Image (spheres, grey):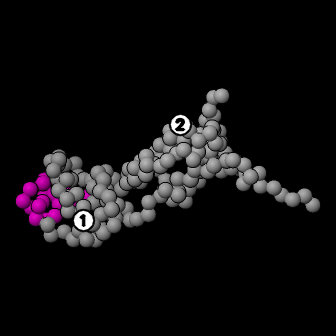
């Protein structure tokens, strides 16, 4: 019987797995509408008092997205003031919806990676993640890998889709 040889393990193929960079932590969305009078009016004195009395410690080590679900016109300082209260507790505060937190986190993380390890090598940008990796993270990673890699494929080694090959 012939021995089965794992050609993928023996190749120079590098796998870039975005799950490896997934920042663990609780994602929480805070809706400013909860502090608006009649759901749309911000009264500064009441707003400040409500923020002062809110238990901000419940957001310890959370990734926070601040947004307003009401169709209210808010002064720019409103979200900034909420951020002031969150800063001592939250890992990160962003403006937008909860779904946007991972996009922002991945952009920060991927912009700090040293991609030189992938220089002139064939790379697989691993797909099929179990964690919520936003599509924008794949786009951002591809832009950086394309600058250095010999080629980039998407998926798994057994069924990768070619995306890019450096011209000789």
Location of the C terminus by quadrant is top right
For label 1, the SS is loop
How many angstroms separate mark 1 from mark 2 (CA)? Answer: 39 Å
Residue at left offset 50%, top offset 41%: 144
Instruction: Decide if residue 109 is on the left or right side of residue 31.
Output: right
* Residue interval drawn in magenta: 31-51
Q: Which residue is mark 1?
A: 88
For marks 1 and 2 on the same chain, the one whose residue lies earlier in the sequence:
1
Q: Secondary structure at mark 2?
A: helix
Residue tagged 2: 147
Residue 86 x/y as whole percent:
24, 62
Q: Tell whether position 46 is magenta.
A: yes
Mark in the foreground, 1 or 2: 2
Q: Measuring 21% from the left and 71% from the top, which residue is drawn there?
A: 55
Residue 44 position in % (x across, y down) = 8, 56
| Residue at 55 percent of width and 59 percent of height | 130
On the question of residue 154 being in view, the answer is: no
Quadrant location, the N terminus = bottom right
Residue 90 horizontal/vertical position (percent): 30, 63
Q: Is residue 3 magenta?
A: no
Q: Residue at x 63, y 49 (%)?
A: 14
**79 and 125: which is toward the camera:** 125
Tell whether 103 sits left or right of 68: right
Residue located farthest toward the top when viewing the structure as drawn: 168
């Amino acid at each position: 019987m012939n021995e089965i040889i794992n050609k993928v393990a023996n190749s120079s193929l590098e796998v870039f797995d975005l799950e490896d960079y997934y920042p663990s932590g609780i994602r929480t969305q805070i809706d400013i509408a909860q502090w608006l009078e009649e759901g749309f009016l911000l009264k500064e004195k009441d707003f400040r008092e409500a923020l002062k009395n809110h238990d901000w410690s419940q957001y310890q080590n959370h990734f926070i997205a601040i947004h307003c679900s009401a169709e209210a016109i808010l002064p720019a300082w409103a979200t900034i003031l909420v951020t002031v209260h969150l800063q001592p507790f939250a890992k990160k505060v962003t403006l937008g919806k909860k779904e946007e937190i991972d996009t922002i986190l991945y952009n920060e993380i991927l912009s700090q990676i040293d991609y030189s390890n992938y220089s002139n090598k064939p790379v697989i940008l691993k797909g099929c993640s179990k964690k919520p990796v936003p599509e924008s993270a794949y786009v951002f990673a591809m832009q950086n890998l394309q600058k250095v890699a010999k080629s980039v494929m998407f998926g798994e080694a057994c069924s990768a889709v070619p995306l890019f090959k450096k011209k000789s």
